[in-house]
Image: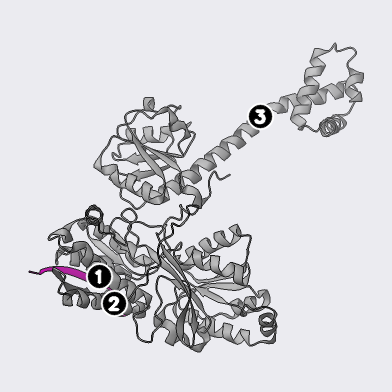
Amino acid sequence: MTRMRTESLGGARALVLHRPHPATQPLLRQLHVIGLEAREAWPELPAEAVTADFVFYDADMAHDGQFPWAPGASPMPMIALIGSEAPGRLRWAMTMGAHAQLLKPVSGSGVYAALLVARSNFDRTIEASARITDLERRLSARQTIVQAVMIFVLRGKSQSEAYELLRHTATAWRVTIEEAAERLVASHSSESPADDSKRVDQS
Amino acid sequence: MRRDVAIGILHSASGPYTALAMVARAGILRGVAEVNADPSRDLSFTVHDRDPEGRLDRYAPLCRDLLQEKGLRHIFGCITSSSRKEVIPELERHDGVLWYSAPYEGFEASAQVAYMHSCPNQHLLPLLDWAMPRFGRRVCLVGSNYIWGWEIAQIARERILACGGQILSDRYLPIGDTALDHIIAEMRALRPDFIVNSLIGQSSYTFLARLAELRTEPGAETAAANGSAPALPVLSCNFTEGEIADAGPAAEGLIAAGPHFETGADGLGSIGEMSRLAVLELADLLQGKPGAEDLPMVELLAQAARQGHRSRLDGENQHARQPVVVAELRDGRFQEILRLPERAADPYWTRREAPVPARPVLRVVP
């Protein structure tokens, strides 16, 4: 997944969370030259920051409270502006979720690369966490699948017959196997164990 | 009372791209001679010449020497992007300015560089936009295996695909290599509507010669007879006047794009002409402002803008506005076939949707 293609950096909006300082002036110039709308913000990120395309932040003096999102949960690529290389500050910068970094004083070179690297890392992170969420959901559904299979087994099917039946049910309902299992288990537990068998088998 | 301003030259008198570097140097010296002979100027230039001999590791020390020992600010030089990248850190350290007058691939805008030739939105893109409706959209890309070849191919690919075209092949050859059999075989088999050639030097000349042979094969004649378009047209953004003799008659019909083409017999060519104009541009910026030669480039341009001087250089990205000229090589000379108004450079290709403002067509008169 790529949010923007290489060429469409034009008109993207960047916020620079840094106190006004000569060390960051070349950054603003370069962002402007590249074609972005760049704005400085200090000490707070404004509310509209959540819609910015990129956020640059001071790794030396900034702190959690200046961001309208939880550490590591920025809705856009973040680029750390690093001055001090003290481990504590670097750890904080990483916790905030740096997708790329620039060293202060910032010169013109490196800004374009930082934008592209940050966006690529951000996209990859989003993609990876979507995959993880999906895998976690499927993992937790495994127990439900076992329960659904057991419903059929209790009605005299073999384990592999029961699993096949579950698969066919899912196909017939046009849902994932995890979802079919969830429905079967739900309807099974809502009914009396004595007379539910026919209904499930018919479906 | 004229003041004296020292400037540096950093061009290689030996090495693989000497021909281009010496044309650039001739253009600089011509510009300097014009300034020094002009009674309306209040300054004269003194030149300090340094020769990196085409060796990449010589550029930074010689640049430093000019900035530190000679105490000057303005250096005219560099042909390749790699040599330009070498000197930028030195320029940053001493707040110097490199006046760079070769075509390049874009994706840079250093505050220490004045970019005086064209970048892709001023050469490649208008060339493709001109070629696709005429020749078709099935395209082969050929280039030398370094940043210029790669980036030109990448930009051409994006533009051609966006226009509904097709990239039939994309090939790179080591610089200086002339082993072209497989590429020629591919051209014979694919019969592209046109070829974007970013090969440099001997590779390019050999490629053009082999293509000329290929055009005389029976299949090519048929293709040419079917439409008005020539068989296997070749487009280039790096072929310049200085190479016409080396490439020989095989280069006939080559179509090039750039800010300027020498239609006469003994001009400087586009790199020389852009180098000459760079010297005149600096002289204009310094005119009537003693001490301005020590200002950082950003300041110099801002001051000129405040005083109403309209520089060809953009105050932000420091790239020159350039006309777009498409020319075809006929009888050993470039013939202009299209001239578009001056347009601003878009080095990062981010303003592609913005319409180009109409401006009067300006002819560069040497």
Q: Chain of mark 1?
A: B
Q: Is residue A39 magenta?
A: no
Q: Is residue A173 visible?
A: yes
Q: Which mark is residue B27?
A: 2
Asked if residue A57 is positioned above or below residue B24 in the image, the reply reads: above
Label 1 amino acid? Val
Label 3 amino acid? Arg
Q: Which mark is residue B279?
A: 1
Query: Tag 1's secondary structure?
Result: helix
Q: Which residues are magenta?
A: B1-15
Given this view, does label 2 or label 3 mark the residue nearer the observer?
2
**Residue at x-position 86% and y-position 24%:** A152
Query: Tag 2's secondary structure?
Result: helix
Mark 2 and mark 1 residues within 8 Å of each other at the beta carbon: yes
Q: Is residue B6 magenta?
A: yes
Query: Tag 3's secondary structure?
Result: helix
Asked if residue A32 is positioned above or below residue A45 in the image, the reply reads: below
Q: Which mark is residue A137?
A: 3
Q: Chain of mark 3?
A: A
Horizontally, is B191 left or right of B251 in the view? right
Front-most of residues B7 and B303:
B303
